[in-house]
Image (cartoon, rainbow, N blue to C red):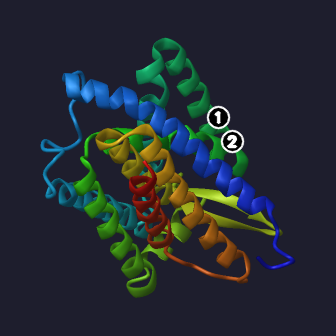
Amino acid sequence: MPKNMEYKPLILIAVIYISIQLIGIGLGYGFIERIESGGIPPVVKEPENPLSSLTIFFYMLFGTGILLFILKFKLDLLIKILSFLFLIMGLSLTLWIPFGFIGLFLAVILFSLSIVKSRNPAVMNIVLIFTIPGVGALFGSSLAFIPSLILILLLSAYDLVAVFGTKHMITLAEGSRGKIPLMFEIPFGDRFLGIGTGDLTIPLIFSVSVLRDYSFMNAVITATGGLIGILILFIYILNRKKCALPALPPICAGLITGFLVALIIQ
């Protein structure tokens, strides 16, 4: 590691990643139980079917297309409405469903903070930490391991094309900053490094699907592999003045490596 490396951004991204994974895996137990008992429906009708991964993949492509359209035509009111819906849904899944009235009270507080302090990166990072786990846990609980593996491979390939090929992911990241809560902002000197909410939701989906079909320790070791992947990515970025890289390929490589290690030692 370079001698002049600044550790604070690495510590912050590690805290964000670990917090989301721990909360999400914890929620995963409840979601898996409710889905299996019929208490809540899975996101896809056939969790075991590998083609279910394609359904979610196309949902995500469709959502990305809508966001690009909204940003291009500067539909500010629609941007606010979709932002509020995203935050309400995520916070509700994370806090309201498992904790009832108390969770609803906390969700309302965090949602209110996201409106009042929308331009404060620290506040928005905290709000997003409690927004993502519910979404990731629900999707992960709705997918068996194989469909989930196919999904992260598809999204990693798509991320490469979207950043290095069409570059529309860069356009989306730059256009959404300060408008749509799609980015975690990591302070680094006089600038902020960004990582998308999707880059932290997708690893959680995979970890929870591992929890669903294997065990808690398998899920934790898998998630640890993803942590190593994201730290390697940030170590590289911190040594570049300006750098836009796809985050999912190294994170997902770490997840798969972590899963294989878990199979060996478990």
**Res. 81 visible in picture:** no
Q: Give the quadrant of residue 260.
A: bottom left
On the picture, is 176 further left or further right than 7? left
Q: From the image, which quarter does the N terminus lie in? A: bottom right
Depth order, front residue of 126/109: 126
Image height check: is 80 above or below 248? above
Query: What is the CA distance from the residue labelled 2 to the residue labelled 1?
Result: 5 Å
Amino acid at the residue labelled 2: Lys
Residue furthest to the front in view is: 265
Residue receiving disc 1: 113
For disc 1, the neighbor class at 10 Å (few under 14, some 14 to 19, many from 20) is some
Judging from the image, what secondary structure is the residue with disc 1 in? helix
On the picture, is 236 further left or further right than 82? right
Amino acid at the residue labelled 1: Leu
Q: Which mark is residue 117?
A: 2
Residue furthest to the top in view is: 101
Residue 64 lies, in percent from the top left, at 35, 63
Residue 235 lies, in percent from the top left, at 69, 73
* Residues at marks 2 and 1 touching, judged by CB atoms closer than 8 Å: yes
Image height check: is 228 above or below 120? below
Tally of numbered discs = 2
Residue 155 lies, in percent from the top left, at 34, 67
Image height check: is 247 above or below 79? below
**Res. 130 visible in picture:** yes
Q: Give the quadrant of residue 156.
A: bottom left
Q: Residue at x 23, y 41 (%)?
A: 43
Depth order, front residue of 222/114: 222
Residue 31 lies, in percent from the top left, at 34, 30
On the picture, is 252 further left or further right than 195? left
